[in-house]
Image: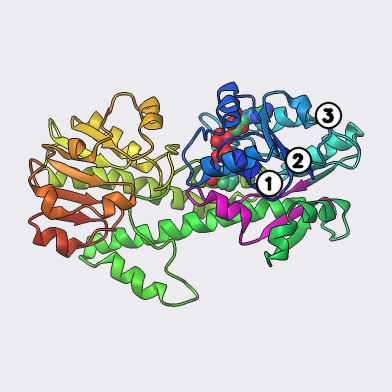
Amino acid sequence: MRISVIGCGYLGAVHAACMAKLGHDVVGIDIDERKVSELSAARAPFFEPGLEELLKEVQETGRLSFTSDMSAAKGSDVHFICVGTPQKKGENAADLTYVDSAMLRLLPHIEPGNVVAGKSTVPVGTATRLSTLMADQECGAHLVWNPEFLREGHAITDTLSPDRFVYGVIDGSEDHPAVAVLDDVYATPLEAGTPRLVMDHSTAELVKTAANSFLATKISFINAMAEVCEATGADVTRLADAIGLDDRIGRKFLQAGIGFGGGCLPKDIRAFMARAGELGADQALTFLREVDAINMRRRTRVVELTRELCGGSLLGTRITVLGAAFKPASDDVRDSPALSIAAQLQLQGADVTVTDPKAIANAARRFPELHYEQDVDLAVSNSDVLLLLTEWEQYRALDPYLLTSKVASPRILDGRNVLDAGKWRAAGWTYRGLGRP
Ligand code: NAD
């Protein structure tokens, strides 16, 4: 099939490459000329494992190209909308200007029978509004909301073999013509047994925000337990192991630590609250305000714990932060808890050096006041305290015995509870985890 992918960021670039991998002819369209030229040269404009190799592989087949010219969408059977929906400045609501503008620019190039498939995460009601706009223009195309659930760091596998496909169509019916078209797009994963659920527009939009709200709640639940453990001297990691063995609960997303961040969970739960308010259903989601508050408190708690570890004052202490990305295997620093903690420490008088295998360039653009050092040995050299804030494999594997001679003082705060506390203490380190004695 011929496919256009509008918006080639973390979601769209991966989606475009994966659709070409599935055998379709794909054009990726983005307003960012720099991104277009990088992608056209088969270079990934951000770090995602396997993406660069996949871009090379599919571009050699001639099935994938990139442009900033929206008219290239003409002739495609399916148009995927993958543009950003960030948080509005100073408000909780989502900023839909990119979705609206992409739609308006796409409309003149849509042909009867085409399918426009929205993948961006949008407030419930957006698809109905956009399908009315399409109907008013009499373009004869169908709108499907087909939310995306990929995880950065696993984006290619998640796109090629997702847990499920969700199709939101206007009447919620399996017989809607757009269902068969999307089934053709996803024929390979569907044949491999991926479940596919058809529903109405609003339910499909809500599936995505509900899923993210549930995950955020699970993380904040265990972080709330960590606060109680800290007050009582209990160990949240053993608590999580024990409750996680109950298969009604499960151990995933019960890793207490510095909390969630990134370009999705924080802004999605806030946009959900804002939308519920507009719909008069704000009471239903007041718990998400607490989920958000618990999450933000973790960052302050790490600053306090670091101050304690430094003997009561941060002034002039040399702190090394291991990790800047919001999670490992990504260079995404949007709302990264690691960077937010690093910046607060620096503001309070510490001398902070941040290291990260992939995210330094992005981090330096957001927080130019921090020091950055790519080389871990140089970053930790003469440090008064280390903070492990993004659990990259290379930081989890650090040898406490070898590190002792490099730092000024062997003290570490494990913000992700991933290190073996006993091993670090045996090597002479003062070790602090979160929610652990
Ligand atoms: P991003 O900021 O990385 O990418 C958005 C891209 O859209 C940018 O490259 C931007 O230049 C482009 N764009 C903006 N307006 C445009 C227009 N009018 N025409 C063409 N291109 C335009 O954002 P992202 O992380 O890829 O997220 C995109 C959407 O997907 C968001 O709604 C997000 O919530 C959702 N999502 C993201 C992920 C993820 O892990 N990143 C996962 C699931 C869903």
| Secondary element at image label 3 | helix
Spatial CA span between label 2 and label 1: 8 Å
- Whichever of callouts 1 and 3 sits on the residue coming sooner in the sequence is 1
Spatial CA span between label 1 and label 3: 20 Å
State the image coordinates of residue 239 (x, y, percent, origin top left): 32, 70
Spatial CA span between label 3 and label 2: 13 Å
Q: Nearer the viewer, mark 3 or mark 2?
A: 2
Q: Is 186 located above or below residue 62 in the figure? A: below
State the image coordinates of residue 390 (x, y, percent, origin top left): 33, 47
Question: Would you name the residue on which mark 3 appears?
Answer: 109
Question: Which of the 4 image quadrants contains residue 192?
Answer: bottom right
Is residue 423 among the parts visible in the rendering?
Answer: yes
Residue at x 74%, y 45% (from the top left corner): 24
What amino acid is labelled 2 in the image? Answer: Ile
Question: Would you name the residue on which mark 1 appears?
Answer: 19
State the image coordinates of residue 322 (x, y, percent, origin top left): 27, 43
Is residue 122 among the parts visible in the rendering?
Answer: no
Q: Is residue 3 left or right of residue 14?
A: right
Q: Is 315 located above or below residue 258 in the figure? A: above
Question: Which of the 4 image quadrants contains residue 27?
Answer: top right
Q: Nearer the viewer, mark 1 or mark 3?
A: 1
Q: Which residues are magenta?
A: 144-170
Q: Whereabouts is ligand 1, in terms of quadrant?
A: top right
Look at the numbered discs 1 and 3 and tell me whether their residues touch, using CB distance below 8 Å: no
